[in-house]
């Protein structure tokens, strides 16, 4: 599929075998991690040019703009690539729930226990 993504950005992206990069949505002012979606070049282009997060639905095989059906919009504040250019961080102003379950974030339900206790900074070996 062709895309209007800036060629300089497209050249930097390291995509999965299916042409996608993970896109982490984070609340811009609190740092709260809201959700993970997937973007291809066109979804990233749309996100950068419209100011609203556009993702690629792997299950439906189509683009979706966060909030078009739910009313829970993500207004883009900034977009950054990680150091390996294989993940996108989209800082947003989230209106309503980010998760399809109706929760504010997709990451608040299950906290997994660590099998080994983690030392607090400065306490290792004490």
Image: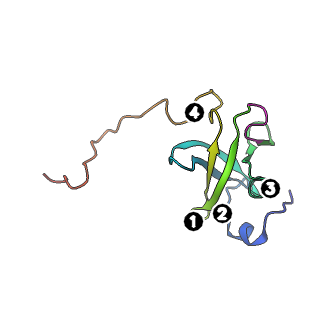
Residue at left offset 64%, top offset 58%: 79
Marker disc for residue 104: 4
Mark 4 and mark 3 lie on one chain; the one further toward the N terminus is 3
Cβ atoms at labels 1 and 2 below 8 Å apart: yes
Tell me, yes or no, whether the highlighted magenta stretch contains residue 52.
no
Cβ atoms at labels 4 and 3 below 8 Å apart: no
4 or 1: mark nearer the eye:
4
Q: Secondary structure at mark 4?
A: loop
Marker disc for residue 14: 2
Cα gap from disc 2 to disc 3, whole angstroms:
14 Å
4 or 3: mark nearer the eye:
4
Badge 2: residue crowd in 10 Å (few <14, some 14–19, many ≥20): some
Residue at left offset 72%, top offset 68%: 9
Mark 4 and mark 1 lie on one chain; the one further toward the N terminus is 1
Tell me, yes or no, whether the highlighted magenta stretch contains residue 69.
yes
Marker disc for residue 84: 1
Looking at the image, the residue that sits furthest to the left is 126
Q: Nearer the viewer, residue 61 or 41?
A: 41
- The magenta-colored residue range is 65-70
Q: Secondary structure at mark 1?
A: loop
Looking at the image, the residue that sits furthest to the right is 2
Cα gap from disc 1 to disc 2, whole angstroms:
8 Å
Cα gap from disc 4 to disc 1, whole angstroms:
29 Å
Determine which residue is flagged by label 3. 42
Mark 2 and mark 3 lie on one chain; the one further toward the N terminus is 2
Query: Mostly what secondary structure, the magenta segment?
Result: loop
Please tell me whether residue 84 is drawn above or below residue 116 in the rendered image.
below
Looking at the image, the residue that sits furthest to the top is 101
* Image position, residue 63 (x, y; %): 80, 44
């Amino acid at each position: 599929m062709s895309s209007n993504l800036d060629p300089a950005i497209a050249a930097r992206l390291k995509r999965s075998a299916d042409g996608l990069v993970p896109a982490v949505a984070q609340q811009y002012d609190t740092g709260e991690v809201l959700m993970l979606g997937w973007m291809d070049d066109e979804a990233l282009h749309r996100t950068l040019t419209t100011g609203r997060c556009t993702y690629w639905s792997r299950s439906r095989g189509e683009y979706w703009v966060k909030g078009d059906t739910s009313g829970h919009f993500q207004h883009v504040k900034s977009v950054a690539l990680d150091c390996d250019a294989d993940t996108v961080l989209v800082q947003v102003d989230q209106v309503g729930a980010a998760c399809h379950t109706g929760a504010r974030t997709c990451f608040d339900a299950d906290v997994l226990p660590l099998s080994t206790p983690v030392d607090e900074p400065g306490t290792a070996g004490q």
